[in-house]
Amino acid sequence: MIALRISLLFLLLLVTFPLGKAKAQAKGSHLRWLPSMRIVRLLIIARMAKVIEVDFLHLSGDLVAWTALINAAAISLLVLDLTIDYSWMVMHAVGGARNTPPKIFRELFFLSGCSAIIGYTLYSSGSISGWGTAAGASVLAFVIGPGTSSQLQNLASGLSIQLEKQFVVGDWVEFEGILGQVTSISWSNTTLLDDLSDRTVCVANSKIDQAIIVNHSKAAPAFKVLVEVGLPYEMRPELARELLVETVHSHANVLLTRPIEVVLKTFNASSIDYELYFYIRDYARRHQVLTDVRARIWYAVQRRGFSIPFPIMDLRPIGGERRLAHSELINQRQECFVALRSLALLTPLSDRELQCLADSERVIMYGVGEFIIGKQDADRSMFVLLSGECGVMVAADPDDGSLRQVATLVKGTLFGEMSAFTDSPRSACIVAKSPVSVLKISQSSIQQVFVKNEKALEGIVELIARREAGLKAFTATQTRDLEESLLAQMGTTLRRFLGYGADA
């Protein structure tokens, strides 16, 4: 029976370790309401000692009296610990982290209560006297001497930090080139998690107390970030601002409810320098968001026919560079012609007409997540996907404007042709799922080719109608009606191009 009691107590002692770890890691779950395990372990050990002494070894005298004293003190300490711990958790649940008294106060209350309980227990048992108290004070004075002045300074600074609430656990702070998330504030130091270098930084409280601190979490849950970029002098400031704002508008982690600011910082030697300020939801993902935005800026600048400027000294002959650029242009036009020739929809067009389209249009590039076609776009161009992969997105919820992917477009796909030929509104959005390059064919180019080739127009109408009929399982009569409807819409669009009006 005695062995069973000891085994149960030992098993209970082992259980306290995972429970204590679970409580330390449980910030938002109900496990945080578990009692602190430090005094529970002391109480279990004291109880085990009493069972062994009295019931197993059958000891008596001073040793048994001391064991009983420790058991009584442990029970009092457990009540004190539970009272303080639950009081702080209730205050945190009601007022939040910033309105809860500093953690250091909780430790001070606990230490003061421990001193009072232990002192009273020893005094009531006659274990200490006036001389004993004096001797203890002498030892304490020796320990807290000149050698521990820095620790006292850290303690005072830690108390000041928590009283003034310059930052709390969970805040992102920066000082003296160190940026990280506060994971703990103890008596002597503050610990930060540097997520970029994946390391823990431990800093003395006295050093933090004397430093200039930037708290990035004061505006939480919105965090303001900065992207600096130099743009060419040839780009008008109004266009530069439009371009920079456009790059962050479709990013999932950017808060569009907060203002997006573009500041023209200075006129540099080779560029006009801008600062782009915007807000994000999760500061821990700032590096990925900034990387995405910078990549999108590069693609947006390229699409508008510019390039990111940088100081350069070019010693190559001008003629050689021009020949290289001309050769690249010829290769690009040939690639576009091959892509157009491979499209079944453009089979009615001759090689000469397709080459005209390839020569008159420009290849443009998009970065991951950028919209090639938006649902409200007024542009009615059609596109040929030369490289990369795109997603076809439709509205998932009209209320919040969210989108869902319904199809994937691969290299060599033609899209946007229905709006291009019939001038009808866009029915879906096209988003780049990887870096892509597309040949954009404008309505004006379509007009120049098809106004002169009525037979090709009729052939394309027939191909579009067959494709739509196949998707919707139309009958032959419905397919013929669709062809007539499409031809009428295309005729209206072409007459508008020529300036005759819709009813001409």
Image (cartoon, rainbow, N blue to C red):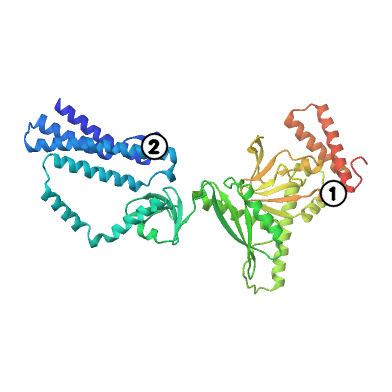
Q: Nearer the viewer, residue 68 or 336?
A: 68
First in residue order: circle 1 vs circle 2: 2
Question: Badge 1: few (under 14), some or many (20 or more) residues near its Cα, within 10 Å?
Answer: some
- Which residue in the protein does label 2 denote? 90
- Which residue in the protein does label 1 denote? 449
Residue 196 visible somewhere in the drawing: no
In screen coordinates, is 440 left or right of 79?
A: right
Residue located 76% across and 34% down the image? 468
In screen coordinates, is 361 left or right of 139?
A: right
In screen coordinates, is 111 left or right of 191?
A: left
- Residue 425 picture location, percent across and down: 77, 40
Residue located 72% across and 49% down the image? 339
Asked if the residues shown at circle 1 and circle 2 are in contact, with their CB atoms under 8 angstroms apart, the answer is no
Question: Which numbered tag is attached to residue 504?
Answer: none
Q: Amino acid at mark 1?
A: Val
- Residue 270 picture location, percent across and down: 64, 69
Give the SS element for disc 2.
helix
Q: Amino acid at mark 2?
A: Val
Q: Nearer the viewer, residue 295 or 3?
A: 3
Q: Nearer the viewer, residue 200 or 95?
A: 95
- Residue 277 picture location, percent across and down: 59, 55
Classify 280 as above or below 84: below
Residue furthest front as drawn: 130
Residue located 52% across and 53% down the image? 287
- Residue 413 picture location, percent across and down: 70, 44
To which quarter of the image does residue 343 belong? top right
What is the C-alpha distance between the residues marked 1 and 2?
A: 75 Å
Classify 93 as above or below 102: above
Give the SS element for disc 1.
helix
